[in-house]
Amino acid sequence: MYEPAGRHNVNLALLWPAFGAAMASEMAAAVARQFTNLAVGLDGPSVKEPAWATPHAIALELESVRLRDFSSTAKELPERGFPTLLCAPFALHGAVISDLAEGHSLVGALRAAGLTRLFVTDWRSATPDMRHRGIDDYLSDLNVLVDRIGAPIDLIGLCQGGFMALIYAARFPQKVRKLILAAAPVDISAGTSALSSVATASPLAMFHEIVQLGDGLVPGRRVLKLWAPDSVEAEDIRQLLQTEEPAGSAAAMRLEAVFRDWYAFTLDLPGRFFLDAVEKLYKRNELADGSFVALGQKIDLAQMRAPLYLLAARDDELVAPAQLFAAEGLVGTAPHELRKATAPCRHLGLFMGKRILQNVWPGVVRWLVEPVITKPEHVPLRVATQARG
């Protein structure tokens, strides 16, 4: 399990919604000013985008996202079943979270377990002219990707990508056959995590001021510099990735370098998207209370009836398992079509940990490829009557 030597800021830096809330509320303005005045800012050296571990193709490219196609082309592995779209989080770090390295790749684990038609959303860093894009804009982009793949699809949402996936499945129920949510925040009031605690305690005005001082963007490199350590200790990386390579070996050092490259590369977020998520999902808990509006339609999770798998990380410091499992009482999924599981790891271990990828995700895939079993409605017994001559 990932236990970062007595500090949680390594983990809190991996996701964005409440990064500013580590300070007391009365210091909000000072924190915002410090954020925008960091020397590294946008003038620091550029960081190369991390490489993907698994060969693939680009199926579609939009301004905000690339659709990466990991479908098998080998003759011995013909395409079968429904296509699966993995909705990666649009967060501080990029979608390579799902394909870090051999043995530490969720993409690889899904393919090895039998998924031959697999796609991943690779959300792109926001540019200044994208600063007004909100959640609705990204849901629209997700819909374009689904149409490009061909509905119905199976949908997997990782952390923040999970709330996007859940909203999408409720908004377009005919396009999603099965849904998997992994460490996704659904009902913020159902549990407490380090992330939700600081989000609740932080004044909303501070988030607005940070966006304003960032000229409408939330620059990822400034966030990383302000709220994360300059480097992650090697032992922390080993525990997180659950690597079996001997410490100090060439293989361990290569894997550590891959992780550090992923960690150093950050995404800039549109201010509107950032504020949408903070205010509507974390502050108001609109998705859970039924008041969230997506693409002009109020989202009633009770109308979301797709088969659902909820996968939590037992020691998740960012998304409390209860915040995910609360979905069970909110959705309209039939009880026989709903599964829950808890993996013995922290947040990132759910997507990168070697043992979790080997031992937990294959069972999720087995559930995913099973046919949907629809129990027949009650049919009144017909009583045969004797024909009259």
Image (spheres, grey):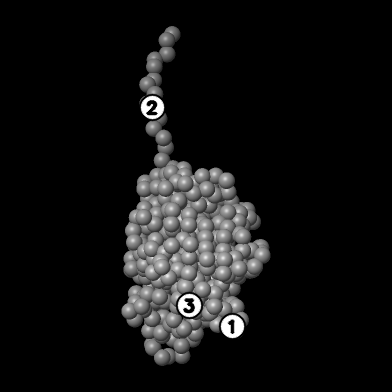
Q: Residue at x 44, y 81 (%)?
A: 229
Distance from the alpha carbon under mark 1 to that under mark 2? 72 Å
Q: Position of residue 11 (x, y in %)?
A: 41, 73
Q: Which residue is mark 2?
A: 380
Q: Amino acid at mark 2?
A: Pro
Q: Nearer the viewer, residue 188 or 321?
A: 188
Q: Position of residue 181 (x, y in %)?
A: 44, 58
Residue 67 vertical placement versus 238 (above, below): above
Q: Amino acid at mark 1?
A: Gly
For marks 3 and 2, the one nearer the N-term is 3
Quadrant (top left, top right, bottom left, bottom right) of the N terminus: bottom left
Residue density around tag 3, few if under 14, some if 14–19, many if 20 or more, within 10 Å: many
Q: Which residue is mark 1?
A: 44
Numbered badge on residue 226? 3
Mark 1 vs mark 2: give the one in front: 1
Numbered badge on residue 17? none
Q: Residue at x 42, y 76 (%)?
A: 10
- Residue 260 at least partly seen: yes
Residue 200: which quarter of the image?
A: bottom left
Q: SS class of the residue under badge 1?
A: loop
Q: Amino acid at mark 3?
A: Leu
For marks 1 and 2, the one nearer the N-term is 1
Q: Residue at x 34, y 61 (%)?
A: 192
Quadrant (top left, top right, bottom left, bottom right) of the C terminus: top left
Residue density around tag 1, few if under 14, some if 14–19, many if 20 or more, within 10 Å: few
Residue 386 vertical placement versus 158 (above, below): above
Q: Position of residue 302 (x, y in %)?
A: 43, 44
Q: SS class of the residue under badge 3?
A: helix
Distance from the alpha carbon under mark 3 to that under mark 2? 66 Å
Would you say the residues marked 1 and 3 are in contact, meaning their CB atoms lie under 8 Å apart?
no
